[in-house]
Amino acid sequence: MTKIEELIKQYEEYAQKNGFRLNPGKGIVERLVKGLLENEKKYGARYCPCRRIAANKEEDRPKICPCQWHREEIEKDGHCFCGLFVRPC
Amino acid sequence: MLELTDENFEKEIQGADKPILVDFWAQWCMPCLMLGPILEKVAGEYKDKLTLAKVNLDTAPQISQKYRIEQIPTVILFKEGKPISGFIGARPEPIIKEWLEDILKK
């Protein structure tokens, strides 16, 4: 299993446990997960690819995926801002 | 389309003869990739009224911080060197056109 597949599986399990699901677009999920891994390489943590990284650990901590805002975004908009997690059908 | 960075941002924005529609984006941001082609199409239709510019957050960390960009995509319209309006997140083409029509009238 590649690192990307492994991470997708982890996020899938997280989504299931929390009553939502991963975006059904496989390509979308793969790209986002690649972005998370890029951020991990560049900044040291899996920061959301749709948020600015301030390079300040304290300030950036809430942006680590799953981010601080994902639950309310899923509830309000049907998906988290970046589109990794979506509301169940 | 202009590519703006920390180095050329202020010069291009201040020296523009038309409003500049700035798209703040990053490579791995899916909503950014969805919005990009829509903005290019719209900017093509409004080419007499505005110029489209793209700012990759990786090449413009100072400018992104200055304009308090927290989420991307963020789109800001600069007129006479000043940010006058904008939105966050991907939007459908008709909504963007409606917003532009309204803001360019002012």
Image (cartoon, coloured by chain):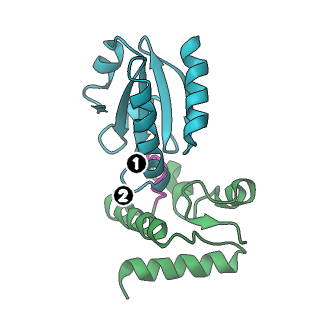
Chain colours: A green, B cyan
Is residue B2 magenta-colored?
no
- Using residue B95 as the reference point, say whether residue A58 is left or right of it: left
Within-10-Å neighbours for mark 1: few <14, some 14–19, many 20+: few
Mark 2 and mark 1 in contact? Answer it, CB < 8 Å.
yes
Q: Give the main secondary structure of the magenta stretch.
A: loop
Name above or below for residue B51 compared with residue B65.
above
Q: Identify the image quadrant of residue B78.
A: top left
Q: Secondary structure at mark 1?
A: loop
Residue to which mark 2 is pinned: A43
In the rendering, which numbered label is found on residue A63? none
Residue to which mark 1 is pinned: A55
Q: Secondary structure at mark 2?
A: helix
Q: Which residues are magenta?
A: A47-54
- What residue appears at the point 53 percent right and 64 percent down from the top-left corner? A65
- What residue appears at the point 38 percent right and 62 percent down from the top-left corner? A44
Name above or below for residue B40 compared with residue B51.
below
